[in-house]
Amino acid sequence: MATELKAAEPAPAEPAVPSLVDRYFTRWYKADVKGKPCEDHCILQHSNRICVITLAESHPVLQSGKTIKSISYQISTNCSRLQNKVSGKFKRGAQFLTELAPLCKIYCSDGEEYTISSCVRGRLMEVNENILHKPSILQEKPSTEGYIAVVLPKFEESKSVTEGLLTQKQYEEVVKKRINATTVTS
């Protein structure tokens, strides 16, 4: 009596469970911030109108070969985002930001310097001090632990905050056009 060996049948594929960010946040993008090519930012907007500012996947800091030397929330001699102290129901003490307000500066080991802007109007709720001590998490986990800052838009402006920002699909098209433009010129 020969026993037949059956090939193991593959288990049915489990549907991919969306991440916390994909489940609760809407991704918005700002391409070429302040006219600087490829310096794209991602804004994760929660349903409660809180916006988390992160780097977009195509930002030069997240590209291969870049090493972050340091990150500074010191914007000018008189302005440090680390001095932001928020308290109470009405968020007293929060620094008010415009769309182009700088949040931090990233210094790379190759001498490049990148200024990260807010991209949305609102009150600065917090900055991520963890990236000061371990800058590599900005590259390893840009959408979660490596976020830059949290901004709360005014309630009246919460619907209009996304004007001028790109959806995920629009952003993917912009990146695709960039790639096509570089391959044509090469």
Image: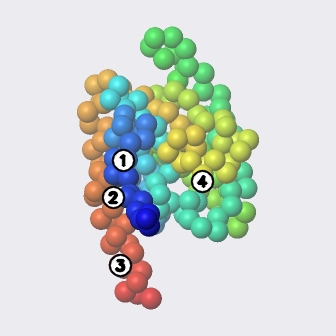
Marks 1 and 2 in Cβ contact (< 8 Å): no
Q: Residues within 10 Å of mark 4 (few under 14, many from 20)?
A: many
Task: Classify mark 3: helix, strand or loop.
Answer: helix
Please tell me which residue is depicted at 70% across the width and 42% down the height of the picture: 132
Which of the two discs, 1 and 2, labels the residue nearer the N terminus? Answer: 1
Quadrant for residue 180, please give it.
bottom left
Which of the two discs, 4 and 2, labels the residue nearer the N terminus? Answer: 4
Q: So how many labels did they put on this image?
A: 4
Marks 2 and 3 in Cβ contact (< 8 Å): no
Look at discs 1 and 2 and give the one toward the viewer: 1
The residue wearing badge 3 is 180
The percent position of residue 29, horizontal first and vertical second, equals 37, 51
Q: Is residue 3 above or below residue 135?
A: below
Which of the two discs, 2 and 3, labels the residue nearer the N terminus? Answer: 2
Tag 1: residue type? Glu
The residue wearing badge 2 is 171
The residue wearing badge 1 is 14
Q: Is residue 172 above or below residue 182?
A: above
